Image (spheres, rainbow, N blue to C red):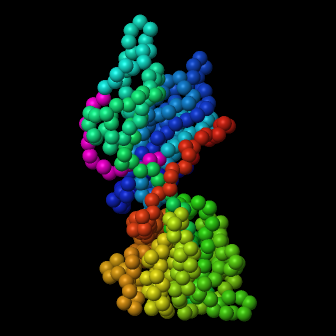
Amino acid sequence: MATIGDFDPLNATIPATKVEITVSCRNLLDRDTFSKSDPICVLYTQGIGNKEWREFGRTEVIDNTLNPDFVRKFILDYFFEERQNLKFDLGIPGKKCGTIVVKAEELSNCRESVMMQFCGNKLDKKDFFGKSDPFLVFYRSNEDGTHDFIGEFSTSYRELSRGQSQFNVYEVILFYSFVSQSSLTCTFFRKSYTFSFKWFPGNPAQPTSLHYMNPYQLNTYAMALKAVGDIIQDYDSDKMFPALGFGAKLPPDGRISHEFALNGNPQNPYCNGIDGVMEAYYQSLKSVQLYGPTNFSPVINHVARYAASVKDGSQYFILLIITDGVISDMAQTKESIVNAASLPMSIIIVGVGPAEFDAMIELDGDEVRISSRGRYAERDIVQFVPFRDYIDRTGNHILSMARLAKDVLAEIPDQFLSYMRTRGIKPSPAPPPYTPPGHPLQTQI
């Protein structure tokens, strides 16, 4: 299972980017008796909120090979804020039937067209009874085949744009490779996430509490956490997330805390994956006493301290706050957000319950940039949404959670890029190409 691909056309936002998927295989299981197999790869996608798989497209068939490099590519709309499932089918039953290598590359939106003309001089003779029949090979060609290589050279659009001159005379070495001067190779920056829960007063054992632990379904806090967490955890490298609570009395002395570790370990508040955060949340409901007031600034400052120590672009921090909407330290919170706006971090606030969220809307700053004591935030880093606006009327919680995650995460890519660009931080070099292991693997990823 992969997480790039299909989307719900009824609720889709404008695509952030298009991604080109290239598929190749190694050491496939041979299903033919007198020759090698003729492999083909079929791509299936899965819509949001349903389990039905639909065929998106298929590659060409390559005859007699167990190591196909499929030429036909799949072009998909990629959405940061959605989980998009893919399934690759090679039509080979069984678990140990070879290795499939899937590569995804962002497509640029460049609309320029370039006309080029090539010629060759004194090429090496490859034919015995006649001269060679030379041709150029471009890597994005849509034809497949094997030929004798004559040689190669590398160039760029910048060099070719100079026209016919001494700059565009090349010595042929092995084969021709065209490199676009405007292309950009990049890798994901590591993102770190902190989850923070506001404890609404009341007994979580009672159905009237927003923290009610219903044995048959998730409460709204848990749904909000899982909806957002299931998406953003795919962008974190180690899947270890600090989870904090605020607004509770802690054992054994009943002291009030606005910044405590959900797992009970203040020295190491990290939880293993979203499932680990969920488990820490449920366990903490059994040990702490929900209590006001509600202060946001301590948890914002907690994350800001970490973000302030990493400004080289290697990490970007995202704080998810789930709250009932009441806030007791508005002035301090605005000050904390203004300070955090210059750091590599974003803040997501999900409002749960029936309360009014006027204060949260002010913190969002979409209409009026947030300020404190005459100083405005350098950039918009807060995104607020009330969960009740995304509840599916038919009771489909999976669809409700998908809608919430889609909207609440929509601003993160632009916030991330705005920080990096204003500070001149460029993407890291691409990692080395993936080398498949020698032993067979499953055909699905």
x then y, percent, for residue 387: 45, 75
Q: Is residue 156 visible?
A: yes
Q: Is residue 407 visible?
A: no
Does the magenta segment cover residue 113?
yes
Question: Measuring 60% from the left and 81% from the top, which residue is drawn there?
Answer: 245
Out of 266 and 152, give the one closest to the viewer.
Answer: 152
Q: Residue at x 31, y 33 (%)?
A: 166
The magenta stretch is 104-118
What is the x, y in percent for residue 16? 37, 58
Residue 425 drawn above or below residue 71: below
Count of all numbered marks drawn on residues in the image: 0
Residue 18, compared with residue 440, is above or below; it is below
Left or right: where 409 falls relative to 66:
left
Task: Looking at this view, name the residue that lies furthest to the top.
Answer: 129
Quadrant of the rendered structure where residue 443 is? top right
Q: Which residue ends up furthest to the right in the rendered image?
A: 252
Would residue 329 be counted in the magenta stretch? Answer: no
Query: Which one is nearer the viewer's eye here, 316 or 254?
Result: 316
What is the x, y in percent for residue 44?
47, 44
Q: Residue at x 65, y 90 (%)?
A: 249
Specify the principal SS of the magenta part. Answer: loop
Name, please, the residue furthest toward the front: 166
Q: Residue at (60%, 20%) from the top-left corner?
A: 33
Expressed as whole percent of the image width and height from the top left, the position of residue 56 reads 42, 43
The residue lying toward the viewer, choosing from 221 and 422, is 422
Instruction: Report the side of 252 relative to 362 (left or right).
Output: right
Picture quadrant where residue 127 is located: top left
